[in-house]
Image (spheres, helix red, strand yellow):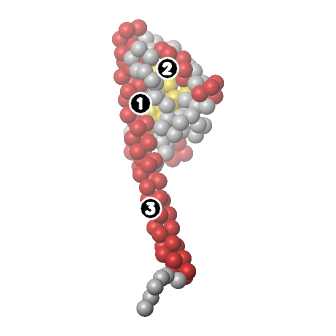
Amino acid sequence: MHKGYTIIELLIVTFIIGLLVALIAVALQGNLAKARDAKRLADLTQIQKALALYYDTNGKYPPIELAKTGPENDGCGIDWCVLRDSLSVYLNPLPNDPLGLQEEYRYFYSSSSDDNYGLMVRFESDSNANKVINDGGVHNDAATLEYYEVGSQTIYE
């Protein structure tokens, strides 16, 4: 009569469970990146609507040469808080990247004239390649395939 499990049996079961957990984690990682990219697209749509309302009220877009999210300046990135303050009546809070304040994935805004603006975001997943290629912006070659641009001024440096 068998009254328990041997250490070998327990180790094999633990190994199999660990392997399954690792496989599931790898499979979910791609889906999480796609979900964050979907959030980025939704954020750009919200910012575009707020910019349209700002333009209707002021007859121009917020005059900021380049604003981007990031950890600089106590979480204000580079002039992102200026854009946040400009749009606070229309969109509060102004979205940041779903991964938080970091260097790699950012939101960008630029307006070099009263009636032009550009928004850009960097995607994580390459599943958005068709959107990037067909967005009309300058970042649509193989080296910059993760940058999605919208707005009437889609030229970034």
The amino acid beneath tag 1 is: Leu
Q: Residue at x 43, y 42 (%)?
A: 37
3D distance between C-alphas at marks 1 and 2 = 13 Å
| Residue 137 visible, this orientation | no
Across and down, in percent, residue 152 comes to: 42, 24
Question: In front: 100, or 144?
Answer: 100
CA gap, disc 1 and disc 3: 31 Å
Circle number at residue 84? 2
Q: Is residue 5 above or below residue 21?
A: below
Which label lies toward us, 1 or 2? 2
Q: Nearer the viewer, mark 1 or mark 3?
A: 3
Which residue is rendered at x = 51% and y = 72% of the image? 14
Query: In the image, which disc is placed on residue 24?
Result: 3
User: Left of 85 or right of it: where is 59?
Assistant: left
Sequence-first tag of 1 and 2: 1
Secondary element at image label 1: helix
Q: Name the mark on residue 44.
A: 1
Residue 122 placement (x, y as % from top left): 50, 38
* Label 3: few (<14), some (14–19) or many (≥20) C-alpha neighbours in 10 Å: few
Percent coordinates x, y for residue 66 in the rendering? 56, 23
Task: Please tell me which residue lies in front, 24 or 113.
Answer: 24
Position above or below: 99 against 54: below
Q: What amino acid is at disc 2?
A: Arg
Secondary structure found at label 3: helix
Q: CA distance from mark 3 to mark 2?
A: 38 Å
Task: Tell me which residue sits at (44%, 61%) in the image.
Answer: 24
Instruction: Judge from the rendering whether residue 43 lies leftward or rightward of residue 156; answer left or right.
Output: left
71 vs 1: above or below: above
Mark 2 nearby-residue class (10 Å; few <14, some 14–19, many ≥20): some
